[in-house]
Amino acid sequence: MTFAGKVVLVTGSTTGIGEACARAFAESGAKVMVSGRHERRGGDVVRELRAAGGSAEFAAADLRAAGACERLVGDTIERLGGLDVLVNNAGILYTADALGTSNEQWLDTMAVNVNALFYLSRAAVKHMKAAGGGAIVNVASEWGLNGEAQHVAYCASKGAVIQITRCMALDHARDNVRVNSVCPGEIHTRMVDDILAKRGGDPAQNLRELASGIPMRRLAHPMEVARCVHFLASDLASYVTGANLCVDGGNDATAGPYP
Ligand SMILES: NC(=O)c1ccc[n+]([C@@H]2O[C@H](COP(=O)([O-])OP(=O)(O)OC[C@H]3O[C@@H](n4cnc5c(N)ncnc54)[C@H](OP(=O)(O)O)[C@@H]3O)[C@@H](O)[C@H]2O)c1
């Protein structure tokens, strides 16, 4: 599936799933805007994409800052000549139950995972509607579908992402703007390493234990999520909107611990 001539903005693409998404779109001919807070890492990603023959730019943004989301969309349109696809991937996670979650952690989670995603989507839809269409793919989580102990703020935020996806898909179906989400399960990135590090003990053993509870008995590579994001953004998914695709090795198919 070619994205030649298309402009794709991927938030949180300095690492992890977002970086893999940037790579997947760049490999298929898109002009990609890489974004995140860390300029050095963002610059490295852009250099790697260009070295592989892709087209990419970097825009530094802390999505919690006032006006940052609108500026990022505007900057992308100005520097790359439009906006055909927005991938809302940036996300953060705190590990705590309700009693252990501070107001700051709650607000921080909502600021990045929910507010920024909404502000970016609103700005993108405004442009896409005027331009004749586009696609938005939101990176939610299987923890937005199911509860997870010690992650109340994160689960609430990802549940909101799934509902934003559905509502915006309905509101903009006739504008030729498709809005979908993916729900990754356990993907081997910095986020999962951080969660496991908090458990203490041997990191390799923690990883093996995590994998043993997944029907497919392994974590995913970030590119396995990126391929699904790429599909949902592409014309191959031309009749798909408001959908939520689980990319979780079978986790969501089971009601309890997998034997
Ligand atoms: N890994 C998993 O198993 C898993 C499972 C389900 C869902 N997800 C979701 O997948 C997405 C990517 O996760 P990941 O595992 O790839 O995590 P990650 O490696 O920690 O990457 C998170 C990305 O978000 C960016 N980001 C965080 N705060 C930001 C802010 N205030 N402003 C701008 N960018 C910000 C980071 O960029 P900078 O550091 O440069 O700011 C980074 O590029 C997240 O939405 C996450 O919730 C992950």
Image (spheres, helix red, strand yellow):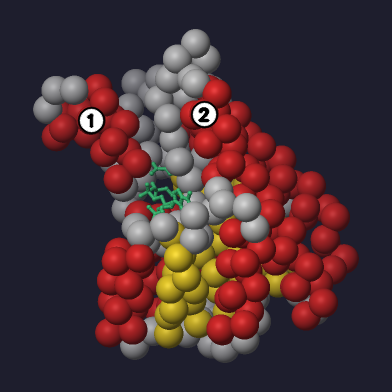
Q: Which quadrant holds residue 76?
A: bottom right
Q: Identify which amino acid the numbered label 2 is placed on.
A: Glu
- Which residue is nearer to you in this view: 116 or 182? 116
Residue density around tag 1, few if under 14, some if 14–19, many if 20 or more, within 10 Å: few
Q: Residue at x 35, y 54 (%)?
A: 16
Q: Position of residue 154 (x, y in %)?
A: 52, 31
- Residue, far top: 99
- Residue, far front: 66
| Label total for image | 2
Q: Which quadrant holds residue 7?
A: bottom right
Quarter holding the C terminus?
top left
Q: Which quadrant holds residue 126?
A: bottom right
Residue density around tag 2, few if under 14, some if 14–19, many if 20 or more, within 10 Å: few
Q: Position of residue 191 (x, y in %)?
A: 34, 41
- Which residue is nearer to you in this view: 88 or 43? 43
Does residue 140 appear to the left or right of 190 in the view shown? right
The answer, for residue 242, to whether it is visible in the render is yes
Q: Which residue is mark 1?
A: 197
- Which residue is nearer to you in this view: 229 or 117? 117
Q: What is the number of the mark on residue 104? A: 2
Q: Position of residue 127 (x, y in %)?
A: 75, 73
**Which type of secondary structure does the marked residue at label 2 adopt?**
helix
Q: What is the C-alpha distance between the residues marked 2 and 1? A: 22 Å
The answer, for residue 234, to whether it is visible in the render is no
Q: Residue at x 47, y 70 (%)?
A: 59
**Mark 2 or mark 1, whichever is nearer to me:** 2
**Which type of secondary structure does the marked residue at label 1 adopt?**
helix
Q: What is the number of the mark on residue 229? A: none
